Amino acid sequence: MWDNFKNLHDKFHERIDEMQRLGGLRIWILHVLDDGPKNGVEIMDSIEEHLEMIQKRHIHDNRHFNKHMMHAMRRPSPGSVYPMLKKMLDEKLVIKLEDGKYELTDKGSEIATKVFGKFRPHMKDIDRGAMAVEDTINEIESYVSFLEDIKSEKLTPHRERISDLSMRIDNIKNTLEKD
């Protein structure tokens, strides 16, 4: 058992070391191109979209944390993306296609697999709308569990709002039953 844990631990640190060696923007570009070819603007859009998903999932109450994370997690600029793409072309991690889009080479794909794992979901295969719905339902379930654990006297002042939410969820349920 210890050997299995040690192997997992070592592999985790190998991935972290590889990510540090590659640098932040290069990793993001590898990640978004792993979903398929993109031009520079599409790369910036995809990175921004991924960062927004991360921010929504990991909103933190700590102001200090938020201040630094909001600064660190923003859309990359053309002045950083295009020079990085040139470096990645020189490193043979990407190629530029005739239509102006960039695509991972075999070497780039190998690194993406090494860093992100070979069984990671490809974003192109994920229905982001379904993923958002799933995340929302999971969040609602968590809050309902929380409310179930609260003593009723603390909930009593919120009876009307809870009733309103219940009716709204019933309306959603009734709409689904019609389909």
Image (cartoon, grey):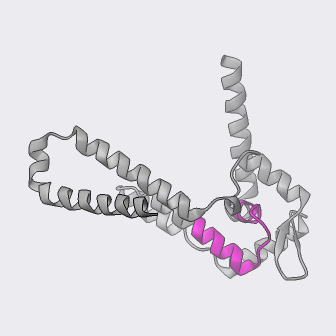
On whether residue 38 falls in the magenta region, the answer is: yes
Height in image: 176 above or below 84? above
- From the viewer's side, name the closer residue of 103 and 83: 103
First to last magenta residue range: 27-50
Image quadrant containing the N terminus: top right
Main secondary structure along the magenta-highlighted residues: helix
Q: Quadrant of residue 98?
A: bottom right
Percent across and percent down for residue 95 are 89, 70
Q: Position of residue 128 (x, y in %)?
A: 58, 63
In the image, taking residue 24 as reference, residue 75 lies left or right, namely left
Compared to 122, does 47 lie above or below? below
Where 167 falls versus 142 (above or below)? below
Residue in view at x 19 percent, y 41 percent: 150
Residue 88 lies in the magenta-colored region = no
| Percent x, y of residue 24 | 67, 61
Q: Residue at x 9, y 54 (%)?
A: 157
Say whether residue 80 is left or right of residue 164: right
Q: Is residue 103 visible?
A: yes
Point out residue 99 in the picture as x, y percentages from the top left corner: 86, 83
Q: Is residue 101 left or right of residue 29?
A: right
- Of all residues shown, which one is farthest toward the front? 178
